[in-house]
Image (cartoon, rainbow, N blue to C red):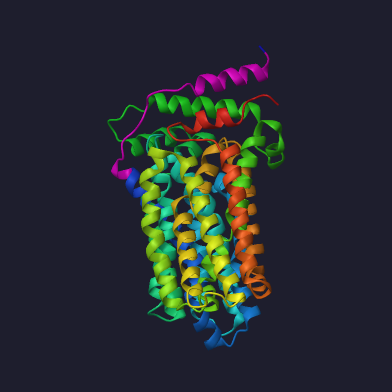
Amino acid sequence: MDGQEGAEQGLLTATSPGRRGGSATWVLLFSTLAAVCGSLQFGIAIGYSSPAESGIMDDLGLSLAEYSVFGSIMTIGAILGAIMSGKMADLVGRRGTMGISDILCLSGWIAITFSEGAWALDIGRLLVGCGVGLISYVVPVYISEIMPKNLRGGFGTAHQFMLSFGSALIYFIGTVVNWRILALIGAVPCVLQLLGLFFIPESPRWLEKVGREREYEAALRYLRGKKSDISEEATEIKEYTLTLQQISEGRILDLFQKIYARSLLVGVGLMALQQFGGSNAIAFYASSIFESAGFPANIGTVTMAVVQVPMTIVGVLLMDKSGRRPLLLISASGTCLGSFLAGLSFLLEDFHRWTQVAPTLVFVGILVYNASFGLGLAGIPWLIMSEIFPINMKGSAGSLVSLVNWFVSWIVTYIFNFLMELSTAGTFFIFSAIAGLTILFVAKLVPETKGRTLEEIQAAMNPLTA
């Protein structure tokens, strides 16, 4: 038997299906809560620019172009964070990376709070973006690696829920406080997570990967409970990790081998389609969208927030029952419909038809889009990304996939205001068409990962047939 065949046999042994599950211990609950403080920070950072827009532009005298730079520069920072995220998480661990992201975000929010000009605002926003770029990768990965397979979907979407909750919270608070106080509020999750990191264990899979055997078993036992039998799970993780070390050294160029083609296509494709569909552009500039439609911006943004949170809760509850694929298909269909309704209403305004109804139709379209996005597309791509890449490639893959997400987000958020000036209706029709492509992509290429261990998913996605 040659090395490749031996490695393949090792994978088959390490990933044979079992009945193992696990219960939600208090350590799992607290560890997830500490991790998703980062997700809350992520959502606040995305939602901040919308309620703060008029206050910042008035107080500091920014032009539309200058505010577009402020809104979009967070994505530049996130690109830098995404480039570093995978390798940093492999080097200093999942917990250490979350701590670094907190320090960056905290510094950024303080800079925004005390800024007196565009340069300080942009530096602060850039730092927040760097932190968010790290968070967007490491939080879903940490949660997926500490969870037993029967809880991974529901707990994994806690990231999605807290992201949506953060955006909703900042929309609400932004209607009653000024932009400087709003920035200080944005720093609170950073402090909470920094404190929580002192009390949660490192990812057992990462500890095993770096050879810290004693800490690995102790962390796994701590997460599962002192009386739990961890022998089967510990053996599976250990065998799979050893086998992967024989196959590849985990360099970024290795991602482009045939054995990782499907994982790479699914991970990159979902992230690109999520952002080209306009999600961050609508979140960043919701107030200006409603104003351009002639609908009260405060009512629109608050209602957006009210709708997205319960829909995200529905997604969390259904994740391990209906699966990832059905939720993604429903979510993409809803964003397609919502974008089309918004585009149609702006088109009616352009032709001076149904002028009294058109603003309400924009409002309904954006609500349908936001509710549908919260149901699946907001968080499931990040959950799937954390599931489909093997541990030896997760650092390189995470950096690349996160980089694609944030690079596309930067493109869309930067050009969004200019597209709106060129053709408001056309902008939303483009988003609707991309959502249609997302439906086809999910139907044809995205696997169902519900109820399978990470090792089973990765062995199926990345067969050793190079």
Residue most toward the left? 227
Give how far across and how far down residue 443 sits, in percent: 56, 39
Q: Is residue 402 visible?
A: no
Residue at 67% in and 36% down: 261
- The x and y percentages for residue 181 are 42, 78
* Left or right: 261, with 60 as reference point: right
Relative side of 273 to 217, left or right: right
State the residue in front, 227 or 178: 178
Farthest-out residue, top: 1
Q: Quadrant location of the C terminus?
A: top right
Depth check, front residue: 38 or 271: 271
* Quadrant of the snapshot with the N terminus: top right
Residue 79 image-quadrant placement: bottom right
Where residue 324 sits in the image (x, y, percent)? 47, 41
Q: Which residues are magenta?
A: 2-27
Rendered image quadrant of residue 367: bottom left
Q: Is residue 276 magenta?
A: no
Query: With respect to residue 233, does 266 lie above or below?
Result: below
